[in-house]
Amino acid sequence: MVIDINDSLKNMMESERLFDFERLIRRRSLDEVPLYSRYKKLSFLSHLPVKQKSEFLTLHATRHLDSIIKHISLAGIDNCLVMVSLQDFDFINNDEADPIYPSFWICTNVEGELLNFRLKQGKGPYASTVRQYLSENGLANGRSVLEWAGSSIEDDVFRVYIARNDCRLLNGIILE
């Protein structure tokens, strides 16, 4: 029996209700909606090494970000910021670690909630890994790989963000 990874991913995303765009962008201050809620939901990737799983998940979260943003645009919503948020980078140095954990970072009240939230261009090793994934798969153009301006890789929870460059709501949030 041959398992189609893309069909399995689609089924997992349906079970996580990630195609329910109205639910994803309902009025909220800030939320991170995970690509998957349990590691066991990734069993269809069990044949892949953890680095390949992490790349696969990063790329598909990035592609789904485009779908969410398209829905926001078609709905005429103008105060909603969505990015991919990535955490759990232990896989870079440990082949036995869990894969990367992608979420959709969603804020539907940017002007009210993000007064002190600042990002910077990602320059650390985790951002470099993410940038490499995007580059090697033709997804780097029109996107920025970012880090929270107040973080360092020594933090317990470190995130790398993928954002679309055409998002006007990032103006004033990204530091040079």
Image (cartoon, rainbow, N blue to C red):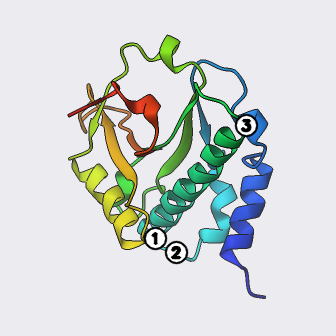
Disc 1: CA contacts within 10 A as few (<14), some (14-19) or many (>=20): some
For the residues marked 2 and 3, what is the alpha-carbon distance in whole angstroms?
Answer: 38 Å
Left or right of 48 on screen, residue 2: right
Examine the image and state in which quarter residue 71 appears: top right
- In the image, 99 versus 106, the foreground residue is 106
Q: Nearer the viewer, mark 2 or mark 1?
A: 1
Q: Amino acid at mark 1?
A: Gln
Indicate the quadrant containing the N terminus: top left, top right, bottom left or bottom right: bottom right
Residue at image point 51% right, 11% down: 112
Q: Earlier in the sequence, mark 1 or mark 3?
A: 1
Residue 69 pos. (x, y %): 60, 44
* Dot label at residue 52: 1
Q: Where does label 3 land, which residue?
A: 75
Name the element at disc 1. helix
Indicate the quadrant containing the C terminus: top left, top right, bottom left or bottom right: top left
Disc 3: CA contacts within 10 A as few (<14), some (14-19) or many (>=20): few
Q: Where does label 2 land, which residue?
A: 48
- In the image, 42 versus 82, the foreground residue is 82
Residue 129 pos. (x, y %): 31, 59
Disc 2: CA contacts within 10 A as few (<14), some (14-19) or many (>=20): few
Name the element at disc 3. loop
